[in-house]
Image: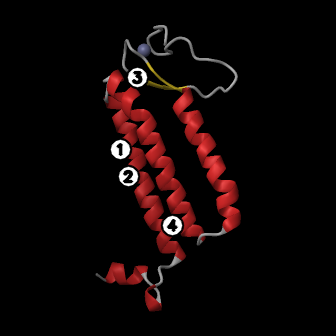
């Protein structure tokens, strides 16, 4: 209860540091969960089906957090939302899944296409 009281200033307005701490905690939990999901889940069809939805949800959540923390500043939204949208689309487009070993493969190069799985050598589709 004392911790919750520390989160707020007088008048019920949340401190900016508290917003950042909530954001960081949510991000660590979400990032760790997704990391382990990608590492231990070898169901490729499920990954292919859910990956665009998960990435979109994470991007929307990230956008909401940043807008909330920044205090709805127009200049933040004008530059930030297109940047998040671009990163979201690139993540969906560049992430591949190996049919043979089930790994999630993140292609870090924009100018070359990953054709083979670097872990098992199977041709990717
Ligand atoms: Zn593979």
Query: Closer to the N terminus: mark 1 or mark 3?
Result: 1
* Disc 2: CA contacts within 10 A as few (<14), some (14-19) or many (>=20): few
Question: What residue is drawn where x is 71% and y is 64%?
Answer: 75
User: 68 or 117, which is in the foreground?
Assistant: 68
Which quarter holds ligand 1? top left
Whether label 1 touches label 3, CB < 8 Å: no
Whether label 4 touches label 2, CB < 8 Å: no
Question: To which residue does mark 1 refer?
Answer: 33
Q: Residue 73: where, in percent of width, then height?
A: 65, 69
Label 3 sits on a secondary structure element that is loop
Query: Closer to the N terminus: mark 1 or mark 4?
Result: 4
Label 2 sits on a secondary structure element that is helix
Question: To which residue does mark 2 refer?
Answer: 29
The residues bearing labels 4 and 2 have C-alpha atoms spaced at a distance of 14 Å
Question: What residue is drawn where x is 45% and y is 8%?
Answer: 122
Query: Closer to the N terminus: mark 2 or mark 3?
Result: 2
Question: To which residue does mark 4 refer?
Answer: 20
The residues bearing labels 4 and 3 have C-alpha atoms spaced at a distance of 33 Å
Q: Residue 90: where, in percent of width, then height?
A: 59, 34
Q: Residue 71: where, in percent of width, then height?
A: 59, 72
Whether label 1 touches label 2, CB < 8 Å: yes
Question: To which residue does mark 3 refer?
Answer: 103
* Disc 4: CA contacts within 10 A as few (<14), some (14-19) or many (>=20): some
The residues bearing labels 1 and 4 have C-alpha atoms spaced at a distance of 20 Å
């Amino acid at each position: 209860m004392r911790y919750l009281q520390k989160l707020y200033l007088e008048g019920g307005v949340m401190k900016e540091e508290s917003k950042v701490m909530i954001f960081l905690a949510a991000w660590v939990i979400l990032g760790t969960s997704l990391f382990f999901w990608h590492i231990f889940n070898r169901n490729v069809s499920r990954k292919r089906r859910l990956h665009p939805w998960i990435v979109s949800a994470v991007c929307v959540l990230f956008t909401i957090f940043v807008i909330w923390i920044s205090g709805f500043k127009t200049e933040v939204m004008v530059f930030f939302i297109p940047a998040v949208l671009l990163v979201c689309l690139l993540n969906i487009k560049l992430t591949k899944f190996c049919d043979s070993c089930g790994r999630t493969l993140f292609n870090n190069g924009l100018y070359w296409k990953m054709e083979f799985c670097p872990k098992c050598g199977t041709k990717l589709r």
